[in-house]
Image (cartoon, helix red, strand yellow):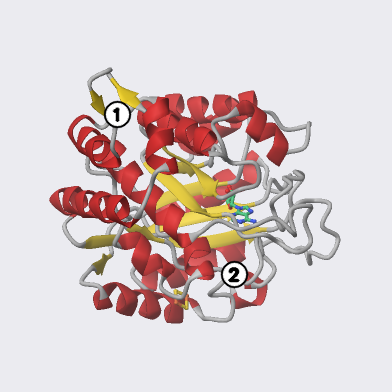
């Protein structure tokens, strides 16, 4: 590819440009993805880790993930808890069970709780307000993060006013046509983007994100994801490999790779240096050292599971998910050790973004 008609482009000079300016064109992002090799990956990871250490040192933030319900009114084609999956054993946690998880998490040192679940109508604004207020009252030094899918602006506002600090809603893909290939026609790209905008305007710290290697994804759609991240500047960005689930329409599709996920983690760190970037459970699922590799590519967050062990296996978004047999305390100890083994340290504060 000719670059400004003068020098011919190399991944090296695009990486230089990205590190210096934190922006590339769509074509340049696509080029960087299509022409990646080990050398480019090494160069990106070095720069990503360097800038991450300037902002966060070797700290790794932890988020206690409480999977409150696997009941979902949606039917996303990739997701194991989609409503059409009749082989999924459904559960929902009561307010008391959620609070018990938070109590246990607090004792283990967590100062952020993520309430994640399918789009389950049981969790009305009234019910959630009560849960959020109770957690915040009991643990004022903690952040409450919600990850409950698409809701109305009014609902987001009520939950924010009740004390929720952060909201995670992956955009899934920034390409409308691609979005429509991953979701049934009842869901819309426009509504997804509107939700993210509403969350931001209401005052939440907002997380977006996408799966790496999802069906129909191309270098072009990833370039659009990166451009979206560059412009939206999310406080958090969750990216992990797509892992096929056997009881979904995508059962026989190929999964994403550790290699591309780590490559993109480094790029995202360079696009927006302060971003909170988890080394996801999905990454740990497809490789025994996936999360360590994610951190070594520029990630700075891990999200151990705090859900009651009785329900863990049921919150199966994808096959072979790790940490479904372990107690919360075991997950924490395991991650501490894993982070220590690569020269990083888990810290227990709220872990806010350092903008
Ligand atoms: N593989 C990987 N990630 C998945 N998610 C849902 N299904 C899968 C899958 N099969 C991700 C989606 C969702 C988040 C909670 O989990 O990106 O937003
Ligand atoms: Fe859950 Fe290692 S993080 S067992």
Locate residue 33 relative to residue 310 in the image: left or right.
Answer: left
Q: Is residue 307 above or below residue 43?
A: below
Between 240 and 132, the residue placed more toward the observer is 240
Image location (x, y in percent) of residue 335: 37, 74
Looking at the rendering, which quadrant does residue 272 occupy? top left
Asked if residue 62 can be seen in this view, the reply is no
Locate residue 103 relative to residue 184 in the image: left or right.
Answer: left
Name the residue furthest left.
54
Q: Is residue 331 above or below residue 354?
A: below
Image location (x, y in percent) of residue 69: 67, 58
- Location of the N terminus (image quadrant): top left
Tell me the element at label 1.
Answer: loop
Image location (x, y in percent) of residue 210: 52, 44
How many numbered badges does the structure rendering display? 2
Asked if residue 233 can be seen in this view, the reply is yes
Ligand 1 within 8 Å of disc 1? The answer is no
Q: Residues within 10 Å of mark 2 (few under 14, many from 20)?
A: some
First in sequence: mark 2 vs mark 1: 1
Looking at the rendering, which quadrant does residue 318 occupy? bottom right
Q: Is residue 107 above or below residue 60?
A: below
Distance Cα–Cα, label 2 vs label 1: 34 Å
Between 130 and 282, the residue placed more toward the observer is 282
Q: Given contact means CB atoms under 8 Å apart, are the residues at marks 2 and 1 in contact?
A: no
Residue 23 numbered tag: 1
Image location (x, y in percent) of residue 340: 25, 76
Q: Residue at x 62, y 23 (%)?
A: 190
- The residue beneath circle 2 is 321
Q: Residue at x 69, y 41 (%)?
A: 182
Q: Residue at x 58, y 29 (%)?
A: 175
Q: Residue at x 72, y 56 (%)?
A: 81
- Location of the C terminus (image quadrant): top left
Tell me the element at label 2.
Answer: loop
């Amino acid at each position: 590819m000719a670059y400004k008609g003068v020098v011919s482009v190399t991944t090296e000079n695009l990486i230089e440009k990205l590190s210096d300016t934190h922006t590339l064109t769509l074509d340049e992002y696509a080029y960087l993805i299509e022409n990646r090799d080990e050398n480019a990956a090494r160069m990106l990871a070095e720069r990503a880790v360097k800038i991450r250490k300037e902002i966060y040192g070797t700290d790794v933030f932890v988020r206690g993930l409480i999977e409150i319900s696997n009941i979902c009114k949606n039917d996303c084609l990739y997701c194991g808890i989609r409503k059409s999956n009749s082989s999924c054993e459904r559960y929902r946690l009561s307010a008391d069970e959620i609070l018990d998880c938070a109590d246990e998490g607090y004792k283990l040192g967590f100062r952020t709780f993520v309430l994640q679940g399918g789009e389950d109508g049981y969790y009305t604004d009234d019910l959630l307000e009560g849960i959020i207020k109770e957690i915040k009252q009991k643990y004022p030094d903690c952040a409450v993060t919600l990850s409950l899918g698409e809701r109305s602006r009014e609902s987001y506002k009520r939950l924010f006013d009740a004390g929720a600090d952060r909201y995670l809603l992956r955009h899934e893909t920034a390409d409308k046509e691609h979005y429509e290939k991953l979701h049934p026609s009842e869901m819309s790209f426009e509504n997804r983007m509107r939700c993210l905008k509403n969350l931001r305007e209401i005052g939440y710290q907002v997380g977006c994100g996408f799966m790496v290697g999802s069906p129909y994804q191309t270098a072009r759609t990833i370039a659009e994801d990166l451009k979206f991240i560059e412009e939206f500047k999310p406080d958090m960005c969750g990216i992990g490999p797509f892992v096929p689930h056997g009881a979904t329409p995508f059962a026989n599709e190929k999964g994403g790779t550790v290699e591309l996920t780590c490559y993109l983690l480094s790029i995202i760190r360079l696009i927006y240096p302060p971003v909170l970037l988890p080394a996801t459970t999905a990454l740990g699922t497809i490789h025994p050292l996936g999360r360590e590799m994610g951190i070594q590519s520029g990630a700075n967050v891990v999200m151990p599971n705090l859900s009651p062990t009785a329900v863990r296996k049921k919150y199966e978004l994808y096959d072979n998910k790790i940490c479904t047999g372990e107690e919360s305390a075991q997950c924490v100890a395991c991650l501490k050790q894993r982070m220590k083994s690569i020269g990083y340290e888990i810290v227990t504060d709220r872990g806010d973004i350092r903008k």
